[in-house]
Amino acid sequence: MNQLKELKGLLDYWTENNNEHARIYMDWAEKVSSTGNEELSRTLVRLYMEQKRLNRRFEDAKRMIS
């Protein structure tokens, strides 16, 4: 397997892994918000947004391989 093909597979894996983490962050942001801890909820939402930003960079990298 050439290195670029291997890297593309890793980028796919990392993207999916980040998506799962992002979903969990949002689930917890909602749970925490319902307890009244808005500061923690906002932090979890920011973590969600960072994961999505990273995924856009992974997509950029995958386009460079194709």
Image (spheres, grey):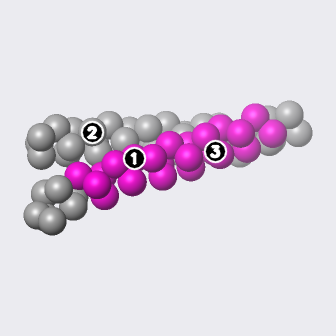
Looking at marks 3 and 2 on the same chain, the residue that comes earlier in the sequence is marked by: 3
Pick the front one: 13 or 33: 13
Q: Which residues are magenta?
A: 8-31
Q: Amino acid at mark 1?
A: Thr
Residue 25 position within the rendered picture, expressed as x and y whole percent measured from the top left: 63, 45
Q: Earlier in the sequence, mark 1 or mark 3?
A: 1
* Residue at the image position 88 percent from the left and 39 percent from the top: 35
Q: Amino acid at mark 3?
A: Tyr
> Could you tell me which quadrant the C terminus lies in?
top left
State yes or no: discs 3 and 2 in contact (Cβ < 8 Å): no
Q: Mark 2–mark 1 contact, CB under 8 Å? A: yes
Reading the image, the residue beneath label 2 is: 59
* Image quarter of residue 27: top right
Left or right of 57: which side holds 30? right
* Label placed on residue 33: none
Tag 2: amino acid? Glu
Q: Residues within 10 Å of mark 3 (few under 14, many from 20)?
A: many
Q: CA distance from mark 2 to mark 1?
A: 8 Å
Residue, disc 3: 25
